[in-house]
Every structure is written in structure tokens, then in C-alpha cells.
Amino acid sequence: MIDSGHTEPREPFVIQGPLFTLLNDNSVNTYDYFDCGSMVVGDQGRILYVGPSVPADYSHYRIKKTQHLIFPGFIDAHVHYPQLPVIASYGVSLLEWLDKYTFPEEAKYSQRLYAERRARQFLELILQRGVTSAAVFSTIHQEAFDALLGAASYSGFNLVSGVTGMNRGAPDDVLVDVGLFKEISSKAMESGLGVERFRYAITPRFALSCDEEMLDYCGQLLEINPHLLMQTHINETEDEVLATSNLFPRSTDYLDVYDAFGLLGDRSLFAHGIYTTESEYKRWAASGASVIHCPTSNTFLGSGLFNASEYVSRNINIGMGSDVGGGFSLNPFVTMSEAYKVARLGGKVLDPLQLVYWHTLGSAKAINQADVIGSLESGKWADFCLIDITSDDIGFEVWERSRSVQEKLFGLMFLLPDSSSRVVETYAGGISRWRDTSCLGSK
Ligand SMILES: [Zn+2]
């Protein structure tokens, strides 16, 4: 179950065991790995030290020893919490899937109790998988946003979210007119003020769901509030790109639609980006916006194959998202292995360090928080998970025989989802927020 840290004192401690982390130095492949490392967590939930041994200053702290791998908390940079119940819906492409499964489910989130139950369920499931931060889509409803904010705050989760803007192209019960959207958004931003580990994201669903007035209001919000982020979708399927160009005939391309309303900048997260054109890449790179790669969604819905190297070669930051419920799993190892397979189908081989980077530091950078999350380094939040690397015979054999850290990580990506080994405990802000009670006392 989820543990709230609100009533617990944050006792400083040292955790010792095998430890891996990338390092935030603008490179994707610098890392620390210790067969037996030490991480010191202070009473404010921040990391005080990471290294091979405990400095004398902290030698009086309580020591927790573990045989599990200490790993940075993952960051899911694109996920829809109201879509958990429509995960694994059969046989449709994106636009049909929205109409047939997603919109009817999202309509239910006007009911506070339903939204609260789903929000708690979402937080529990995502923490179980070692995810400690996420950029989350909600619905148009105030109730849905409030439920998520409450659940995340209770569980110490680092949340980015906002009320979803959509005023056309869907059934009435998941649409909101711009006047009401302004009212709900204002209340939501106000209720998020002062909430620790929360950042508001303006969230126009995508261009097909928003008319010019809606997009214009979102752009104004972004401009006058320099601390806000913006999240939306782009270039996910060919049908969607075509429909968007028909709705916005004056725009030169999909990215131009968002740019025209002030939604393109270094606080912007665009999910998918599969059918991006040369002129869009150029403008994207100049803007500092991030792309969020959602491979399980892209393969599940048959949307297309993301071309990571086009973004990498232009220094466009890449984050990674599960995109549940288009994506079929909240598990970061499933998402990373799917990204590897998507690249292979495009003739490329991705370094496992690159994949981990996208799901940790790249995603942290996308939400403008790489200075405080995404790696296990002094000064950052102590967001981490413990990964069981010993319970599965084959998995442990692969771990032991791997000659490099890359090989070890690669083995985890492909073996962990189908293994008895798994994430067994997740810490956010230095407090254990979820643990697998079946292995309590054994490690
Ligand atoms: Zn999405």
C-alpha cells in the first residue's frame, strides 16, 4: 500500500547496496556504478552524498543495507491517469480508440469519488513500478484534477499536471467551453499553489480538441506565468496530422499551429512527434521544447515508429512516457525495451544508457527539474527505487555475467518485466512510499 510520509519524521539515514545512477553533466553516458555504494539521505528528503563509502560526518546515521539495486526514481513524462481502465482496448487506431474507449471513460471523472478512487489506484500502481515523478493528463473536470493533486500530495509523488482543455471534436460530456475552462483552470492553479512537489502544466489535449480561442487562452497563460509548463500531443498518426492541417489551413504544419498560439518554447512537452517534418525539426530545435517518446503507445495503436536519431542529431531533448492507456504498461522497463525495439526496426541500436537517460534525466529536463530530480546526486531529492536483481535465477545469471553496466541495464530492460525480480520498494523525498510487503524482513 501507499505510505504517506506526512506524519513520519524524516529521519536521516544511509542506504548501502549496489547503486547505479547517471550523472547530470549534459552527457547521456556518464554514470556512477558501485557494487556496494552508499547514499546519505538528509532530514529534508534530499541526498547529501553518494559514493563508495560513508563520510565520517554521517557515520552516526542509521544504516539500511540492501542487496537490491538502488536506482534513480523514473520519470514518466507523458501519461493519462483517467485512462488506466481502458488500457489494452482491442483493435483500433488512435482516433477510433479515443471515441470508442477513452472519451466514455473520461466522462466519469466528473464524479469526485470515482476520480479519487482512480487517482489513488494510479499512484499506487505507478509507485510500484519505481516511478516517482510524472507529467500526467487529467480530464476537463475540476474533480479529476483535485483528486490527482490530493493523492499525489499524500504520497509524496512529484507531480506535473493541469486541467485538460478541449472544446471540440468529442462528446459534450468531455468538452468544456472556454469560459468554464478559465474558471476551472484558475481554481486548479490556486489549489496547487504551495503544494510541495507540484507544478502546473497547461494542458490543451491536442489541436483537434481545441479551437483557436482555447489555444489562444492557453498561450496567454503560458506567457504570463513563467513557472508553468505546457503539455500536449503532436504528429502521432497520419490521420491526425491530416485532420489538423484541414482544421488549421493557414498553418504551415502541426508545430506551426502550436507556435502560432505561443505554445512552443522551452517549457513545452510534445508527446509522440512521429511524423515530424524537416521544417518542424528546425523550429523545434530552436525552441528548446522537448519531445516525449511513448513507444508502447505507438506500437500498440499502430501509430508509427519514432525516429529518435532525428531528434538526437538536432539536440532536441527527449523524455519518455508510458502514455497509458494508449500505452499498455506503466513499467519503465517495458517502455525502454519497447523503445529499443522501435529503434531496431528503424535500423538503429540504442545504448541502454541512452534509454535510461530518457526515462530519468531527459524526462527531468523536459519538466524543467533536472536540477532536483532524475539522478542520485548530492542536493537532489532522494527519489529512488530498489530493484530485486537476485530472486530470478536467469536474471541474476545475466546480471552476474554481464561485463559492462550497459549489459546489466539491458538485461534488466528485457528480463525484468517477465521475471520474479522486480521493483520492491520506492522512495520519494527520502521516505518509503511503497514497498512490496511480501518480501519485508527478507532483505
Ligand atoms: Zn497521450
Image (cartoon, helix red, strand yellow):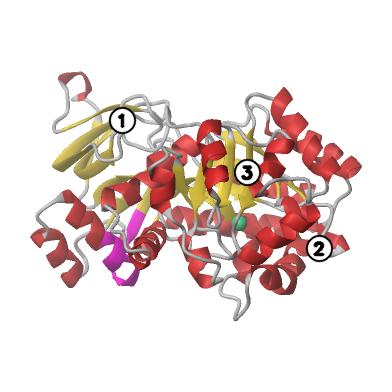
Q: Which residue is depicted at the point 60% across and 81% down?
A: 91
Q: In the rendering, at what x and y percent does residue 99 appear?
A: 74, 70
Task: Check if residue 258 falls in the magenta segment.
Answer: no
Disc 2 packing (10 Å; few <14; some 14–19; many ≥20): some
Gap in Å between the C-alphas at discs 1 and 2? 45 Å
Q: Mark 3 points at which residue?
A: 231
Q: Residue 127 location, x and y as percent?
A: 46, 53
Which residue is located at x 71 percent, y 57 percent?
115
Residue bearing mark 1: 377
Look at label 3 and name its amino acid: Gln
What residue is rendered at 77% in x and 55% in y? 209
- The residues tagged by marks 2 and 3 sit, at their Cα atoms, a distance apart of 19 Å
SS at mark 1 in the image: loop
Q: Are marks 2 and 3 in contact (CB under 8 Å)?
A: no
Which numbered disc flags the more N-terminal residue, 3 or 1?
3
Who comes first in sequence, dot 1 or dot 2?
2
User: CA separation, marks 3 and 1?
Assistant: 27 Å
Amino acid carrying mark 1 in the image: Glu
Magenta segment boundaries in residue numbering? 412-424
Ligand 1: image quarter = bottom right
Q: Which mark is residue 170?
A: 2
Residue 375 at least partly seen: yes
Amino acid bearing label 2: Ala
Q: Is mark 2 on a helix, strand or loop?
A: loop
